[in-house]
Every structure is written in C-alpha cells, then in structure tokens.
Image (tube, rainbow, N blue to C red):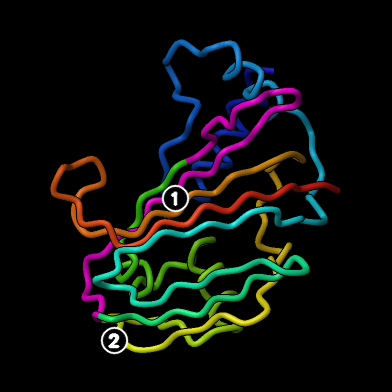
Amino acid sequence: MAVQLGRKLSSIKSRFPLHCGLKSGAVMSKKALVLAFLLALPMAQPSAVSLSRLHCEQNPKYFRTLNVTIANNTITADIYLAQGLKAGFRGHIDLQLRLTNAKKFQSLVQTDTDYCELLSSLKESLFRRWIHSVAKNSNFMENCPIPAGPYYLKGYQVDMSLVPSYLLNGDYRLRALVYYGKYRSKGRLFLLECTVEASMKN
C-alpha cells in the first residue's frame, strides 16, 4: 500500500507545480490517512461532473462588472474589466475534497502560478490546457497584458478529458484566487476570488 501511495502522489506532483495536502515526512491526521488510503486505490476516470454552486467576489476598482452563473451544468460569465491587468498577477488554486459522511472539505492539492509566465511558457501543462479549453467559449485573453474592456464566457461545460484520472468520485470545492504580490503577505492586492462546488461520478 505504501508503494501504491507513493506512486499516486508522485503522479499528482508530476502534473502540478503544487503544494500537496499530504506532506511526505509529516504526521498525518486520521482524515489525511483515510484520504491517503483512498488515493492509493485503483480508480476509473470520472465520466461526469455536476456543478452545484459558483460564487465570485471582485475588487471593484478592477472589475466593474462580474456576473457568473450556472445553468444546466454550464457556466456563463459577463465581465467588464475597469483597469487592465499588467504582467505579474498570480492565480492560487485550492482543490478540496469532502470524504464520504464528512461535513467539511479537506484540501487535496494547492498550486500558485504566475498567469502570464504560464501563458508565455513553451511547456505544456494541465492548467494551460484548461485555459485553452475555456478560451474556446470566450474572448478571454491568452497573452499579457490584459487590456480593460468587456469579456464573456458563454455556455462553458467541463471538458472531461481534462479531469485528472486520479481524482475520486465525490464532492469537490475549487477556490481560485487572483492577486498581485505574495500569497501570504499583508501587502497582497486582491483582484478576484471564485468558489466552485461540484460532484464527480463514473
């Protein structure tokens, strides 16, 4: 089982430049041990995602309008960027899983990325493929800087081919924070934060 878990965590780390909720060498809590056991089990690729909740908050100095909605398992957004975004803004993503019969979500993986560096990099990554997938249904910029003006996302549905095969069936929460500065610093400039909740099943 230890070998299987090591391979599973190595598989996750190879796909993401992340901080993993299960730290090697650390003493694990009971819930973390359960999560580690589940990650080590054989699993099938999830075949469906059901979106249940989406909530966003914005810095009004940068986002004059931010209307994001879910209907019929599709995401639609109407955005007006009041100020352009120059290079250097970052995205912090926290993917959380709620175990069976548990009341709270537990952080599974976290990653913090310079958005503009990600787009300019020649290296292909899962996050870059997600950006390209969203861009097909929007006028979102795929290069920096991002000028002020109107942006939209129309009828976006989750591309199941981009969902990692190591994710378990269950309830998930994704928190995405966009900001300038350092993630844990007092001088961090908040731009935008969205929380999405969804269930995955085979």
Residue at (34% x, 89% y) in the render: 149
Residue 99 part of the magenta segment? yes
User: Mark 1: which amino acid?
Assistant: Ile
Q: Nearer the viewer, residue 193 or 168?
A: 193
167 left or right, relative to 135: right
| Residue pointed to by mark 2 | 147
Magenta segment range? Answer: 83-109
Element under disc 1: strand
User: Mark 2: which amino acid?
Assistant: Pro
Q: Which mark is residue 72?
A: none
Q: Earlier in the sequence, mark 1 or mark 2?
A: 1
* Crowd around label 2: few <14 · some 14–19 · many ≥20 (10 Å): few
* Crowd around label 1: few <14 · some 14–19 · many ≥20 (10 Å): many
143 left or right, relative to 46: left
| Residue pointed to by mark 1 | 93
Q: Position of residue 134 (x, y in %)?
A: 57, 75
Name the mark nearer the viewer: 1 or 2.
2
Q: Quadrant of the N terminus?
A: top right
Residue at (44% x, 79% y) in the render: 79
Question: For residue 117, what is the image quadrant?
Answer: bottom left
Q: Nearer the viewer, residue 202 or 117?
A: 202
Q: Position of residue 125 (x, y in %)?
A: 49, 62
Element under disc 2: loop
80 left or right, relative to 71: left
